[in-house]
Amino acid sequence: MPFNFAPDTDDATPLYLLEADGLAPWLMKQPSTVQVWVEAAGFKAELGQVLVLPTEAGGIRAALAGYGSGAKRARGRFHLAGAAAKLPEGAYRLVTELTGDALSNEALGWLMSHYAFDRYAKASGTKAQLVAPEGVNAMRLEAIAAGEARIRDLINTPANDMGPVALEAAASELASAYGADFHVIRGEALLDEGFPLIHTVGRASSEAPRLIDMRWGAGIGPKLTLVGKGVCFDTGGLNLKPGASMGLMKKDMGGAATVLGLAEMIMALELPVQLRVLIPAVENAVSSNAFRPGDILPSRLGLTVEINNTDAEGRLVLADALAYGAEEAPDLMLSMATLTGAARVAVGPDLAPYFCDDEAFVSALEKSARRVADPVWRLPFWEPYEGMIEPGIADLDNAPKGGFGGAITAALFLRRFAGETRYAHFDIYGWNPTAKPARTKGGVGMGARAMLEALPEMLGL
């Protein structure tokens, strides 16, 4: 499927993007035949509405796409993609007064609307192609669309084809494509090299647990470490999930998928950073050697963890990976994970909640998220809740009782393993429950585009 702009040729069909209150002034400048055709078709330039203007010979002279009113546009994003999906196949040249971020976002939405997950059944996205509008960075948008497609493909693939072995293969393929160094610690070697939590969570699976470690960069520039939760399927372990809660657990490696997609964007755009990607890849399965409620486990950092729920396993594998990443004292360390239902209850499926105490990071991210239409929402590392993750019998509790502030207590747990590193954590959903323009139902990237936009300011690039 194409995630590229169409070649800039003279035969591209003009596509006029018209706001509702701009239709009448535009029509006044058109021939009477066009005015009659538009009126007869009932075209009102409503959001997502499309009308093709024919030639006398039956070809396409031009096309109109409705852009509605500002109030309705504020309720969504990538509106042009909704119109693009209704256009006949061919190349189109956008005629619009949009500029800057608004134009770039609409152009990106068109590229992302080409996405369809077709591994198991025939499927297709938008067939119409767009000539890169003047003023947009076409190469950058194509790289972002490709990274987003990678995220979606990884999340959408079911666990029978995306277990720890396959996730390692996908990461290795990406590393090879960009000349990155690639190293994996598997199975019993995790114990030998100091990753007891990763090993314990994944040991019940027929596919050995592993820690994926990818490095890219020329050894110059700030150090950026991305840590992604790679729980390829989560049964809940011995605290077995009910069927309704288990149905979407193929997406529990959405954090890993998202950091790999973000890494692809960074490498494709050749950002001057020393990039490291750490992914603990496991399956939380049920077997005779599965870890149990009540177990007290060691961690790489030396802190002990009491297991009060084996379904709170993501923070365990991330803990070892974060401790490992912090040992190099990167300039910025970021974790992404489909971690808690509490975050979904708090902000729903569209917003990417994040935790960070660095105000410069927050300022850069919030501005960038608005610019690139990748919404985020800050939640607090609320220190009065620290006592909730301290059970007394061990240093930490992986699932505090009471059910209050679940996303916050999980984030506080992770922060214990990040040390003094500048650190932020994203508790993403990674799934779009209903189809929207440029965002098919299924796996979706959250926070990656905002982070990519913010990195130059965050790291002084």
Image: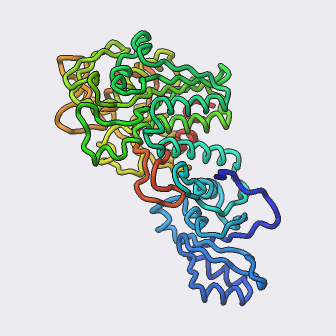
57 up-or-down from 357: above or below: below
Residue 389 in which image quadrant: top left
Residue sitting nearer the eye, 204 or 363: 204
| Residue 182 spot, x, y in % from top left | 59, 22
- Percent coordinates x, y for residue 209 in the rendering: 42, 24
Q: Residue at x 52, y 50 (%)?
A: 120
- Residue closest to the eye, 51 or 120: 120
Of the pair 315 and 412, the residue shown nearer to us: 315
Q: Give the colour scheme shown.
A: rainbow
x and y percent of residue 419 in the render?
40, 19
Q: Nearer the viewer, residue 194 or 284?
A: 284
Residue extending farthest to the top is 192
Point 37% across, 46% down: residue: 248
**Residue 374 is at least partly visible in this image:** yes
Residue 216 in the image, given as x and y percentages of width and height = 62, 25
The answer to whether residue 395 is left or right of residue 188 is left
> Is there any visible trace of residue 446 in the rendered image?
no
Image label count: 0
Tell me the quarter of the picture where residue 223 sits: top right
Q: Is residue 301 left or right of residue 97?
A: left
Establish if 241 lies above or below 133: above
The answer to whether 344 is drawn above or below residue 386 in the figure is: below
Looking at the image, which residue is at 39% across and 42% down? 353
| Residue found 51% across the figure and 67% down from its top | 70
Residue 246 located left or right of residue 113 = left
Q: In which quadrant is the C terminus drawn?
A: top right
Name the image quarter holding residue 302: top left
